Image (spheres, rainbow, N blue to C red):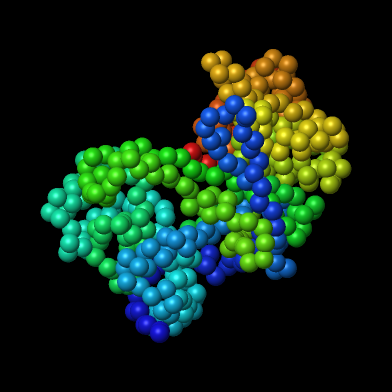
Amino acid sequence: LSRALPLAVPMSRHFFSSARLPVLVNRELRTPLASATSSVGSTRHIELQLPASMSYLTADNVAVLPENSPQLVSEVAAAMGYSLEQVLQVSDLADSSKKPFPLPVSVRDLLTLYLDLTGELRHSTAKLLLRHLHPSVSSERREAFQQLLRDENRAQFRQLHLSLGALLALKEPLLAPLTVAQLLSAAPLMQPRYYTSSSSSSLHPQQVHLTVSVTRYPLAPSPALASSLLAPSSDPAEPSPVFTGLCSGYLSELSPGVGNSCRAFVRASSFRLPADVSTPIVMVGPGTGIAPMRALLQEREHQKATGANVLFFGCQHSEVDFLYKQELQAFRDRGVLSELHLAFSRQHPGGSKVYVQHLMLKTDTAASLATLVVDQGAYVYVCGATAMGADVSKAFVQVLEGRGVDGAQYVKDMQETGRYVQELWSV
């Protein structure tokens, strides 16, 4: 059956510009200690096949459009009374440039590919849903929902990490079935997640590699107000729910094989190597910030660059999350890596934590860095968490001031001329 929906939905060009990239490799990079009593987390190395129409430059960004899980899609469709095979067409959007996503579309594809059912629900969206409470909802649950959505309870609301999909698919319904039009007005469109590629386009022109940290952690027990709202008859013995990042969780489950692919497109990054291969580079990339540094090292080896390549890498434990350990050691052994500085912040429980910025400020290392930057015109690349980036910037200022220059101004000038490049994200 086909159904016409006269709607005004924002357009996302990403749905039209992305391509399906088959998954070639998907392997774990972390190694749990034999003595570990809990999960050490997960970081995946993923290799994707590029279509002939798509190309990238070394360390470019790859934008991935995640998908909602088949289980969630089925649960939402059942709760809302949708037929997954029903085909939808938006009647008043004849101009294809204004279509919010490719049309016609089945309900299954709409819920799987185009609506973000898993991301955190906005407080304002939840307020709009108050008018759609299920007729069977008790007065106590109604009051609990209203209280949770008061401005003074925003902190409790955020604690829930509540998604639209979870709210729609509650075992004890909270919301009345929404029409597809009502769902479209409430659900945000799926947004791409960006990953800096970890491969050289010269070495791997038909593939692109990603280094993906999987976001997964148990949620704290729900506040009493939320518990009475979301699961009034739940078993207290049930384990706490686990929050999994939509895109990283989706990618982690994509096994190599026929039919397993993800929608993606390429966006230019700010990481570009110096044109002169004799120019040294300094790379600071703890954790998954190693991704573009791996790409740059592959490219520098391919270029037969003569300039020094210096890397600062950090993680918690040398035997657990030292990402690409064998590769980095091989780069060093082949002379591609001139210097490899390693910081392991949790190597010795109870001891002081060592981070990459601490290594930079060691007397000999600071003097060497100042020589590379001031005398030899080194380029600097930093990738990782925002807080780390700020600490590394401060460390470079100190290093340069040790040479008697205005460190803050020098770093600013480097940024303006493309010699100090950062790609940072909030944790």
Residue at (73%, 68%) from the top-left corner? 52
Which image quarter holds the N terminus?
Answer: bottom left
Relative depth, front residue between 326 and 237: 237
Residue at (48%, 59%) from the top-left corner? 69
Q: Is residue 381 visible?
A: no
Looking at the picture, does residue 351 appear above or below residue 28?
Answer: above
Q: Taking 148 as reference, is 397 left or right?
A: right
Task: Identify the image quadrant of residue 138.
Answer: bottom left
Q: Taking 414 as reference, is 139 left or right?
A: left
Residue at (64%, 19%) from the top-left corner? 361
Looking at the picture, does residue 209 appear above or below residue 109?
Answer: above
Tally of numbered discs: 0
Task: Identify the image quadrant of residue 264.
Answer: bottom right
Task: Identify the image quadrant of residue 346.
Answer: top right
Q: Is residue 32 visible?
A: yes
Residue at (49%, 65%) from the top-left corner? 113
Q: Taking 11 as reference, is 128 left or right?
A: left
Relative depth, front residue between 379 and 174: 174
Looking at the picture, does residue 366 appear above or below residue 324?
Answer: above
Q: Taking 126 as reference, is 103 left or right?
A: right
Residue 295, position in %: x, y? 72, 45
Residue 162, position in %: x, y? 34, 50
Relative depth, front residue between 372 and 171: 171
Residue 189, position in %: x, y? 43, 62
Name, please, the residue furthest toward the bottom: 1
Residue 305, position in %: x, y? 84, 40
